[in-house]
Amino acid sequence: MDLFDEHVLRETRRQFIGRTATGIGTAALASLLNPRLFAETTLPKADGLTGVLPGFHHAPKAKRVIYLFMSGAPSQLDMWDYKPNLQEMFDKDLPDSIRMGQRITTMTSGQSRLPVAPTMFNFQQHGETGTWVSELLPHTAGVVDDLAVIKTVNTEAINHDPAITYIQTGSQLPGRPSLGAWLSYGLGSMNQDLPEFVVLNSTWSAKRDAQALYNRLWGAGFLPSKHQGVALRSTGDPVLYLSNPQGVNSQTRRRMLDSLAALNEKKFEEVGDPEINARISQYEMAFRMQSSVPDLVDIKEEPQHILDLYGPDVHKPGTFAYNCLLARRLAERNVRFTQVFIRGWDQHGSLPRDIRLQCGDIDQACAALVSDLKQRGMLEDTLVVWGGEFGRTVYSQGTLSKDNYGRDHHPRCYTMWMAGAGVKSGITYGETDDFSYNVVKDPVHIHDLNATMLHLLGIDHERLTYRFQGREFRLTDVHGNIVEGLLS
Amino acid sequence: MSPSTRMFSLISLPLTLALLGSSGSLRAEEEVRFNRDIRPILSDTCFTCHGPSDKDREAGLRFDIEESAKSELDSGVRAIVPGNLDESELYQRITSTDEYMVMPPADSHKQLKPEQIELLKKWIEQGAKWEDHWSFITPQLPELPVNKTDSWTRNEIDHFILHRLEKEGLTPAGEADKETLIRRVTFDLTGLPPTPQEVDAFLADESPNAYEMLVDRLLNSPHYGEHMARYWLDAARYGDTHGLHLDNKRSMWPYRDWVIKSFNDNMPFDQFTIEQIGGDQLPNPTLSQKVATGFQRCNVTTSEGGSIDEEYIVRYAVDRVETMGTVFLGLTLGCAVCHEHKYDPVTQEEFYQLFAFYNSLTEKAMDGNALLPPPTIKVPSAQDEQQLADLTALIEKLKKDKESLYQDVAYTDPTPDAVAELPQSEEIVIVDDEPLADAVLLGNTGQTWNFVGAPDHPVFSGEKSLHRAGDGMVQQYYEQDKSPITLRAGDRFFVYVYLDPENPPEEVMLQVHTQENQWHHRAYWGANKVDFGKDGTTQRLKLGELPAKGEWVRLEVAAAKIGLKAGAVVDGLAMTQFGGSAYWDKLGILTYGDFQQEGYASQHVWEQIERTLDLSSSLPEDILAAIKVNPADRSPELATKVSHYYLENINPTTRVQFQSVKEQIAAKTKELTDYENNIPATLIMEDMAEPRQTHVLIRGEYDKHGEKVERAVPAALPPLPEGAPVNRLGLAKWLVDRSNPLTARVTVNRYWQKYFGTGLVKTTEDFGSQGEWPSHPELLDWLAVHFMESGWDVKAFQKLIVMSATYRQSSHVTSELHKRDPNNRLLARGPRFRLDAEMIRDNALKIGGLLNEEIGGPSVKPYQPDGLWKVVAYTSSNTANFTKDEGPALYRRSMYTFWKRTSPPPSMTTFDAPSRETCTVKRERTNTPLQALNLLNDTQFVEAARKFAERIMREGGSSTADRVAFGYRWATSRFADEREISILSELYDMNLEEFKNDPSSAEQLLTVGDSPRDEELDPAELAAWTMVANTLLNLDETIVKE
C-alpha cells in the first residue's frame, strides 16, 4: 500500500465521516475509493493488471479459468482412453515389455501377477470429430466437439498426497504456491468485491474412503497469504465470518464501521502510518463482500432452463452441479480463477460401482458448464480444464471379474481435457500404447500443462517468478514446455 | 519493483543503495564495496552459469572465486582486470550491443540495470577489490562508531543506529510516551497487553529505572517463555497432526512445553541448540534432553498406502537438513539436493555429507497414522511419577499379602487316589461333502466352492473334498450361518489339507468369523503372505511351518489361542491359501462338551482332567507343563507352584480366601496400567546402532545412488570442533562453536526482526550470496559476538534490545520520512506493525476478561466454523471431525490451539500464521478484507466484545463518557480524547435506542459464544456496549504494536 492515494482517500473519508451512518451508499463509496479487493496497490498497470507483473507477457487468450479437479485420480481406461483390443486380454498378464520395470505402488507390487482388466463399459464415437467416449459420460459426449481431449498427461508421483500437491503447486512437497495463488500474485484481481481465486469443494457419491484434500492445494506457499484461494463453503457462511453476528443487522454494522473508520482516520492523522488507510479500505471491502457474496451464491434468479441444464443436483448446495453453476457465476463476475474439487475417484476396488456414481455426479454438470459458457459467448475467453492427479492401471488390483475390478495408481499416462479460450476444439491430443500404459506420441507432462495454462493467460511461465530463499521460484520449477498442438 | 521504491531510488543515497536492493547513482568519492554492492549483482545475474556449480559452468569462468574471475580464460581474455575497463571482458560484454555477445544472454531472462553496470564499472576502476562472502567470515567485535552527538544513545545498539542516521542526514525520533512504551514492550516480551493497572503503576513510577524494572518484571513473567516459544515453533514447524495424507493426530506438545520452559529458565542458546539437535546423544541424557530432540521430529510424515519407504526416508532427512540450514545457518541447503548449489559454496556431495547425520534414525518411513510413531518417550510429570510409585508399592504389598496367605491356608487332598471321570472329546463336522445349508458361501477368484471327488482328486473323508487354486490370496469361506456354533471351553477348530506337491501354496490359513468380532481371528501355517489383521496377534498367528505336501495333514487350533472365549458365536469360517493348489476336507470343531472346569476339591482329580484336555487346556503354559510332570518327579519348587495355583484358582474352599486380595491386585494393576497408558508421550530422535550408508542421490532421486559419502560439514565453513563426536551431537556443537560464523548472526537477526518487523538482514532465511546485505553490518556483528560472549544469554539479549534508545523511539512518521524509508530500515522511528495472529486473539481474550492463563499442556480446540476439517479430510482420518472444546479450554492462549496442518485454524492463517508444514522463520504481514470479517464477526471476537462490554458496564463508571474512556484504556492502554469519546458515545446512544426498540436482537447478540452473560445488566445497554466493544477490538490501534 505504499502508493495508496492518500489524498483521494482522505477527502473521501472526510465526506463520509461528516455524514450520518446512512448518509453514503456503499456503491458510491466503492466508486470513490476504487480499490482492488486483494490487490497490491490501487494503481492498475498496463493491461489493467493489479498484480506484480507490469503487463501481460503476450496477449492473453483466456481471461479466466475454471478448473474441474477430480481428486483421487479417475480411470482414463473406463472414461476416455478407448482400447478395444484389451477385451481379448482379459485376466492375462500385463506383458513385461509394457511395464518395462517401472515402479508401481506397494499396494500392488506384492501381487503375484498383474492381470489385465479391460473396461466393462461400452465406448462410442461422438460428435463431428468422432471422439471415443465411454457410456459413463453421455452428456459430456455431447460436447466433445468443444473439447481438446489430452490422453498423454503424465507425472512422476505415484501417491495421492505428493501427486496432487505436485500438479497444483509444481512440487511434490508442501510449501510452494498453488496455481491460483501464482495468478493472484502475478495478475491481481479483475473485480472489486470478490476474491480473485475461489475454491469450491463438492460432495461426492462413491462409497469407498475418499482421498484427502489439503489447504495447501489452494495455499499461497511462500507468497503473501492474501494470494491463497478463498474456499466458498456450501454450509454456513459462504466466506468465513461473512455474516454479522445474530442480532446485528446491516445498518448497525454500517454505523459501527463508520465510527471505526472515523477513529482509525484520526489515528492516521496522528501517527501517519499509511497502513491504517489500507486497513480502513479493507473494512469497506469486507462490508461490500457482505452483499456481493450472498448475491453470488443466490441461484434463485437463474432461469429454469439453465437449472435444468445442470441437472437436478443443482438445487443442492455443495454438489458438483451446484458448484459448476457457481463457477459460471463467478466467471461472469470476473473472478479470474475458480477451482472446483470433487473427491471419490480413488477406485482400487469396486471400480465399476463407484465410477458410475462419480460420473453421475459430474457428467451432466461438466457438459452444462461448457454449453452454458458457450451460449453466453464466454467460452471464448474462459478456459475450462478437467482432470485428476494421475491415472489408473490397466491391470486389476485385487479380485478381477468381467464386471468387477479395481485399478491402482498410474502416473505414466492419463486423460484430461481442456476447452475454451485459445484451445483447439474437437481434438484428441497424444497417443498411448494398447494398454494405456505408456505414451507413444506427444507426452504432456503436468509442468507442460501448467506452462500452457499460464501461456493462455498471457504469462510466460519462465517469467512469473518469486524470490524466496535466494532463488527465483516459479510454478513450473525448472521445467515446462508450452504444448503448441493444443493451441488454436 | 513497486512504484514506491522506484520513486525512492531517484533520491541519490549511495549507502541505501544496496540496502534497498534498488537502483541509484553513485557519488564518485564513495568506495564501491564488493560484498555490499558487487556480489549481489554477480550472484543474481551471473552465478547460474559462472558460479559454484561445476556442472553448469560456462567458459570455465566463475565469479564466486577471485582467482578465476581475474585470471586468463581459455579464450585468452580475462573477465576482470583491476583498473582496466578496456581489458575487462566482463565490462565489455555487459555493455555490448551485439546480441550474441551481450551478457547476461537474452534467454536467461536476466538484465542488468544501468545503475548496476555503473557500479561494476566503478568497482573495476577502483581496483576490483575482492572480499570473501561476509557471512562466512567469523564475526569479530567491531569498534563502536564515534558519532557527532551522543546524548541520545543508551546502549551500544544506538551508536551503530545513530551512526547510520547521521550519515543519512536523519535524526532519531523522540522517545515514545510511557503508555505507548509499556504497551509496546509488554506485547514484545509476553505477547499480551498491559492491564490499565499495570499502565497506571508505570505512569506513577517516576524513578529513573522505572522502565528497566518493568522490563525485568516482564522477562520474569511465565508468559515470556510462551511468547518466545511461539516464534520458535514456526521455525520448528510444530503441528498437532502428521501433515500428510491422513493427517492424523500426533503427540508433540511435550516438546512445546519443553520450549516454553527453556525460554522461561533462560537456557543459554548454545545449550538450547545442542539439546534439540543432539540431546539424545549427550552422555546419560535426561528425559528433558530427549524431549528436546522433538525439534527434529516435527517434520511432516506420511503413511499413505502404496508409498515407497526409501523415498520417504530420504524426504524426511532432507527436510531435517533444510530446517537446520534455515534455522541455524541461514543457508538454503536444500538447493544442493539435486545439483551443486548455484549461489553458495555447498556442493551436492556436501549436502549429502550433512544428510548423513540424519540418515540413521530408528524412525520408520511410514508413521502408521499413529499418535506416537516411534521412537517416542513417555513424559510423566512429578505428580505422575509419585502416583506410579505409590501404586507400584501398593501392588507389591498386596502381592506379599497374597504370599502369606498360602501359608495360612490348610489343605490336604481328600481323595488322593481317586480316578477322575474324564471329559470325552467329540468332533462336530461342519463341512465334509456338502456345502452348508444355511450360510452364505463365498470364494475367490470367480468361483465359490469347488467340490471334487476321487479318483481324479485326493479325498480324506466321505466322497468329496474342496479344491482351490489361484494366484495370490485365494479362499473358500462362509458367513452368516443361520445355525451358528456357540463355543465352549476347550474347543478346537480342525481341518484336513492336502497340498498339491507340484504346485503347493506358500501359506494356508484358517480364519474365524464371530457375530461379536467379525473376521478378526486367524491362524496360519507357512509363509506370512496373507495380509489380514495385525501380525503376531490373535488376528494373525503363526502356528507352524507349511504342512507336508502330497499327503493329508490335520490342521488344528485351540479357539482360546486365537482370542476366542467360551460363549463366542461362530458364524463363519474360511479356508485360505496363498497361491498354489490345495485340497481341503472335513472342517469342524473338536469339543469336550460342558465339562466341569473348576471347583475340584481334589488336586489329584483336577490334574487328571487338565492332562486329558492337554492342548485345549486354558491353563497357563507353565502350569500345564508342570502338571504333566509326574508328582513324584516334581521338584519342591514345581510342586509348590502347582499347589499354589490350585489353591488360589481351583479349590472351591481355598480360592474364596484368595478372592479379595486377588481382586485388589487386579484392580490396582489395571489402575497402574491405565495410568501409565495415559501418561503423555512425545516423539524423539534415536539413531540406529549401525549407521545407514549414505550416497549422493543423483538429481536428488531416492533410488539413484551416486558416490558413497560420510558425515562431514561443508568445507567453506570451519571444521567440526576438535574432539567432537561425528554425529548429531557433534554437529550441534559445531553449530554453536565460537568459530561458526553463521549461527549467532542468524539468531540475533531473527530476534531483531521480532522487535522491529524486519531483520538487519532482511532475508532472515538466507545469509548466502543471494541474501540481502545487512542494513547495519557492524551492528549485526557486534550483536552476534556480544551474544556469544554473554554465554548465549537469551534474556539478556532481549533486554539489550528493549533497553536501547532505538527501540524506545516514537513510531510517529511524517509523510516525508515514510517516503524516504517506508520499511523503517534506517530506524529513525520506532516500530509500528500489526500484531501476529495469536497476539490479536490473545489480546481480545485478555481485554474481554476471558483469557485462561494456564501454561503448557495438550492442545485445545477453540471456536472454529463447522465443517472445515470434514470438507478436506480423508474420510476415516481421526481429524476429519472437529469437536469444539468446552469451558476454560476455549480461552487458552492461541499458541495452544490444535494445529491440523492440512486445515490450520482459519483465524490464525487469515492473519498470516504459516501452515507449519515447513520451517518458517519470517511471517508475511498482509492486510485483507478477510481479516476484517474475522475480527468483526468471529464468535470468539464477538464473545470477547460481549464480555468486554460487561466489564465496561461493571467497572467503567456510570456516565457513557466515563465508560467509553474506560473501554478505550483497556483496548489501547491510553486515555481517549474528547473526539474519540464523542464518536463512540454517539455510536452507543444510537445503538441503545435501536436495541431498546428491538429487544430480541439484543438478546440474540448476547448469546453469541459459550460464556454466560451477566443477567443483572440491562440487555439493551449491554448489547449497545457490545457493539462499542466490537468497535474497540477492531481499532487499528488495538491490533497494532506501536
Image (spheres, rainbow, N blue to C red):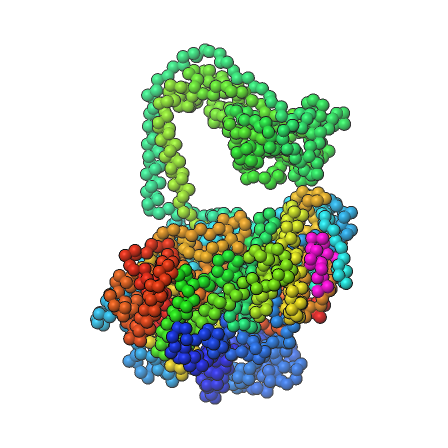
Q: Is residue B475 visible?
A: yes
Q: As drawn, is B322 to the left or to the right of B1034?
A: right
**Does the rendering let one see residue B823?**
no
**Residue in view at x 54 percent, y 50 percent:** B875
Where residue B197 sits, quadrant-wise, is: bottom left
Q: Nearer the viewer, residue B862 or B1019?
A: B1019
Asked whether, in this view, residue B91 is left or right of residue B671, the answer is right
Residue B938 within the magenta-colored segment of the rendering: no
Relative vertical location of residue A433 with respect to residue B777 in this rendering, above or below: above
Magenta segment: A132-146
Residue that appears at 62% across and 85% down: B96
Q: Nearer the viewer, residue B228 or B355?
A: B228
- In the orientation shown, which residue stands out farthest toward the bottom? B28
- Above-or-below relation of B326 to B1011: below
- Quarter of image, res B433: top right
Looking at the rendered image, the quarter that the C terminus of chain B falls into is bottom left
> Residue A411: x percent and y percent?
66, 56
